[in-house]
Amino acid sequence: MSQQQDDAMNILASDISVKDVTCDHDHRASCSNCRLGSLCLPIAVSTEDIEQIDNIVLRSRPIDKGHHLFNQGDNFKSIFAVRSGTIKTYSLSPSGKEQINGFYMPGEIFGMDGISDFSHASSAVALERSAVCEIPYDSLGILSNELPSLQRHFMQLMSREIANDQRLISWLGKNSADERIAALILSLSARNVRRKFSATEFRLPMSRTDIANYLGLTIETVSRILSKFSKQGVIELQNKELKISDMEKIREIAGIK
């Protein structure tokens, strides 16, 4: 696999997940008993440290599809972790054109775009019924001074986000539409495996319009290519339920050996 292809997979896998990973919408859940803790918390967090993190995390009741957690230009106060559902972040140009920046699923952190000047550079909206954990940034800063592993973890997250933004801009200008969509499907597969689900069957929580926007394509192109992949026997797609029928072929299309 070339460095460019490897970068493409890393970019997509960092921003887009897969299955509607079932996690109870129980706002009384804690970091210590959340099965997604291994995804959003540093690996080396002790039981005592987790209790300190629990004390600053705010757990809301489920939010409905279309609910905004924050809007572009809002004052930055917190970062968020997805417990269930799917969150989309996007920014608006001066002319009002939407550009999707990422999709966030269970175990993923979002909202860090406001750290630099304490103003959100994007908006965050639920694509489906979802639940999130809110982590007040001031409280996180105080706790990070006491827990070096937590501080390193969030520094790594911020660094990764910056690097991925830079790679995505470069990658979208160099790959064909077929390659982009094939790489997206493979990245969804990889993320599904990371959550201990099937590598070949998963649900697409985002619309084709959102996929097109994120990948820099038109919805017609996305629909045409997905239909072509289906006719070639590479995938099966029923509404939003996708099955990879020929993993070797989809890897070949993506240019990944």
Image: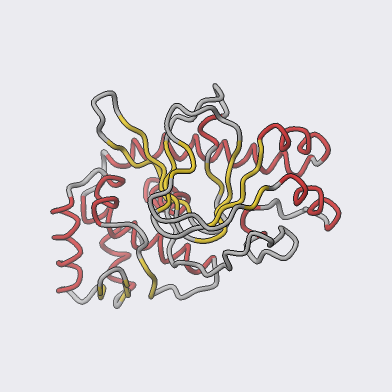
Residue 131 quadrant = bottom right
On screen, residue 166 versus residue 171, left or right, reads: right
| Residue 105 falls left or right of residue 95 | right
Q: How many marks?
A: 0
At a point 65% along the width and 66% down the height, the residue shown is: 35
Against 235, residue 36 (above or below) is: above
Identify the image quadrant of residue 33. bottom right
Closer to the camera in the image, 255 or 49: 49
- Residue 9 x, y percent position in the rendering: 41, 53
On-image quarter of the C terminus: bottom left
Question: Colour mode?
Answer: secondary structure
Q: Position of residue 141 (x, y in %)?
A: 73, 33
Instruction: Identify the residue at image location x=40%, y=62%.
Output: 188
Q: Quadrant of the N terminus?
A: bottom left
Q: Is residue 220 left or right of residue 158?
A: left
- Residue closest to the eye, 180 or 30: 30
Q: Position of residue 253 (x, y in %)?
A: 25, 61
Q: Is residue 131 left or right of residue 145?
A: left
Q: Quadrant of residue 25?
A: bottom right
The correct choice, above or below, for 165 with respect to 80 in the image is above
Q: Position of residue 167 (x, y in %)?
A: 40, 38
Q: Which residue is drawn at the image coordinates 42% and 54% (left, top)?
A: 16
Name the foreground residue: 102 vs 183: 102
